[in-house]
Image (cartoon, rainbow, N blue to C red):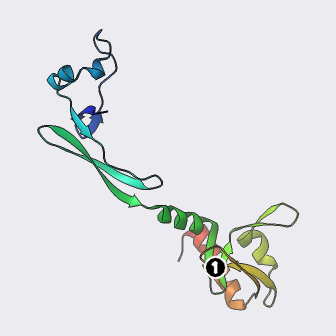
């Protein structure tokens, strides 16, 4: 079904269903055209993507332009970066699910208990686990730097 719209100050407006006592105003193409509405051509947009939307208007129609600004991979990377941080031993999950069902914050709850030589679980970029990776002094320092970065914004 063809859609009609008006572009006013960069904003898109679709016709109301009823207007001034006229039922199904939005279906009366001749009236819509006389009132300045134009055929609206919607851009194809894929689910899971974020777009910057703009419009191009010419004499006969308004065309929606959808510029991809985030792909599903971008959203997944952002999620991963919220849940993990990188170290020389691999990625560390910020929230650690304990065996008893509780959750602990790695940097504030677990890091103070770690010593060099203790095994921990790290992750690869794909989220798969590396088990029995041994903590190093370098790793502890990297975690402390991550805590400072998270708290103060320092890099």
- x, y (%) of residue 55? 24, 45
The vertical placement of 55 against 136, above or below, is above
Q: Residue furthest right?
A: 100
Name which residue lies at 27% across and 11% down: 20
Q: Residue furthest left?
A: 59
Query: Which quarter of the figure has residue 118?
Result: bottom right
Name which residue lies at 44% across and 56% down: 49
The vertical placement of 42 against 112, above or below, is above
On the picture, is 138 further left or further right than 32? Answer: right
- x, y (%) of residue 79? 57, 63
- x, y (%) of residue 85? 62, 74
The answer to which of 107 and 75 lies nearer the viewer is: 75
On the picture, is 118 further left or further right than 140? Answer: right
On the picture, is 144 further left or further right than 43? Answer: right
Disc 1 marks which residue?
Answer: 124
The vertical placement of 74 against 60, above or below, is below
Name which residue lies at 51% across and 61% down: 75
The answer to which of 59 and 52 lies nearer the viewer is: 59
């Amino acid at each position: 079904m063809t859609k009609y719209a008006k572009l006013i100050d960069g904003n898109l407006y679709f016709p109301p269903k009823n207007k001034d006592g006229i039922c199904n105003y939005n279906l009366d193409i001749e009236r819509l055209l006389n009132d300045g509405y134009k055929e609206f051509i919607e851009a194809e947009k894929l689910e899971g993507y974020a777009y910057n939307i703009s419009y191009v208007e010419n004499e006969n129609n308004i065309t929606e332009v959808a510029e991809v600004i985030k792909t599903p991979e971008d959203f997944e990377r952002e999620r991963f970066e919220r849940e993990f941080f990188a170290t020389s031993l691999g990625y560390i999950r910020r929230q650690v699910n304990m065996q008893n069902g509780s959750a602990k914050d790695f940097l504030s709850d677990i890091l103070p208990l770690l010593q060099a030589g203790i095994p921990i679980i790290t992750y690869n970029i794909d989220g798969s686990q590396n088990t029995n990776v041994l903590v190093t002094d370098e790793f502890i320092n990297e975690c402390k730097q991550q805590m400072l970065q998270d708290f103060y914004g320092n890099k």
